[in-house]
Image (cartoon, grey):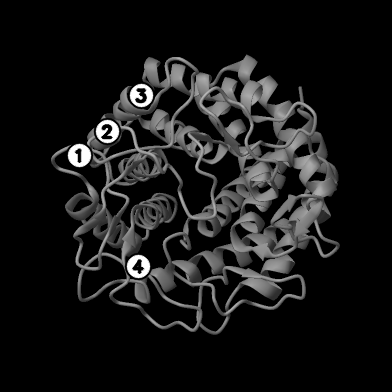
Amino acid sequence: METKLEKKVEKDSVKFDGLSSLTIELQDELQRILHFWSTEAIDTEHGGFLGQINYLGKKCDKAPKGAILNARILWTFSAAYRTTKNEGYKKMADLSFHYINNYFVDAENNGVYWEVDYLGNPINKRKQAYALSFAIYAFAEYFRATHNTESLKSAKAWFQILEDKFWDDDNIGYIEALTENWSPIEDMRLSEKDLNAPKSMNTHLHVLEAYSNLYRVWPNNKLKKSIKALLDIFQHRIIDKKTGHFNLFFDLDWQVKSSVISFGHDIEGAWLLHEAAEVIDDKVYIANIQKITLNLVNITLREGLDSDGSLFNEYHDNKYDKDKHWWPQAEAMVGLMDAYQIEPKEAYLTAIFKLWQFIQAHLIDNNNGEWFWRVDIYGKTLPTDDKVGFWKCPYHNTRALMELIQRIKGLEEVSR
């Protein structure tokens, strides 16, 4: 018996011709971004990758290096090697893996430091659940790509640390941060723009993302239980029952501390929740999460899109932040494609094409490589934004490109 998707694919041959052309463009852009990070972002003097390249392309060779940037670089090149078998990408993944092991891993207390200086000396030793999650995510991907057992061993150990040190037995969920030796810490923020709250949507989303990737290579029962617990937390604690959006910050007992709506997180979470349910292959969770996924995507289409198809940043106090950041545009393409695979409506594909056109016209830097951090409502770039930085990384855009390439390939196989 044909599925809804199979029937829809047969009717959309013209649209799929467009997807085939889109795939070529996505592949070209993927190679272009990876070339930038393979050539421009390497720290040839001090090892690893540079901590900062500014808007003008100036390399700041003495900039500090963050755990998040480095873990995301490792994930990116590991995934690129796994999907393309390009040996050059493996070389970059190896470089990143060894740098993290040598400079970010806390040999005394375990876990990973938040930040090191340009020489690799730790300058912020705090332990952030968010950083541990990305270390797990990256090391699991490196194992998927290379079968390096040391990588998997570390990812398993960090999973146990998250469960032992960060899980809140009294109120459920994961706290944000601890000191270098796992003691309580007063300031738990990821960045200065975040609230100092003990729990956040963002951290829980990326713990879930990390656990899903780890489960692919280590289908452990305790890990599966933790993934289910996270999916329950999203369904019953994080998703606002009235608006359908994610709430962002919480007290220990899950009292909401913020009214900001983040459209990028909504649509990124839409597909990551669905991915987690599918990874553990639980039919009840899949059915429930698919409804949530479609609702989050539909809300984003209805409330978060500009007339040109791009995604606004946030909504707060009855006002839109109308800047168009690079990562929500990338995540939105994946969320829309995931929604199409669940419920094959042409509107989802149309939205993908419009988003890609916006990205090509405004975010891709055709002169210096990579994508700009953001543009304003008029399509102008902001010279204060880095091209490479603590949070500016290759993970969102390369992942979106790789996800779409693989998903379109799957759709084409269904249509044959």
Q: Which residue is mark 3?
A: 163
| Amino acid carrying mark 1 in the image | Glu
Q: Which residue is mark 4?
A: 51
Q: Nearer the viewer, mark 1 or mark 4?
A: 4
| Amino acid carrying mark 2 in the image | Trp
Can you tell which mark lies on residue 331?
none
Q: Nearer the viewer, mark 2 or mark 1?
A: 2
Q: Is residue 220 above or below residue 66?
A: above
Q: Residue at x 62, y 36 (%)?
A: 257
Q: CA distance from mark 2 to mark 1?
A: 23 Å
Q: Residue at x 68, y 30 (%)?
A: 239
Q: Nearer the viewer, mark 3 or mark 1?
A: 3
**Helix, strand or loop at disc 4?**
loop
Query: Where is residue 328 shown, x and y percent of the image?
Result: 64, 55
Query: Where is residue 280 shown, x and y percent of the image?
Result: 50, 22
For marks 1 and 4, the one nearer the N-term is 4
**Helix, strand or loop at disc 3?**
helix
For marks 4 and 2, the one nearer the N-term is 4
Q: Nearer the viewer, mark 4 or mark 2?
A: 2
Q: Which residue is mark 1?
A: 150
Direction from residue 266 to residue 225 in the image, left or right: left
| Amino acid carrying mark 3 in the image | Glu
- Determine the image quadrant of residue 373: bottom right
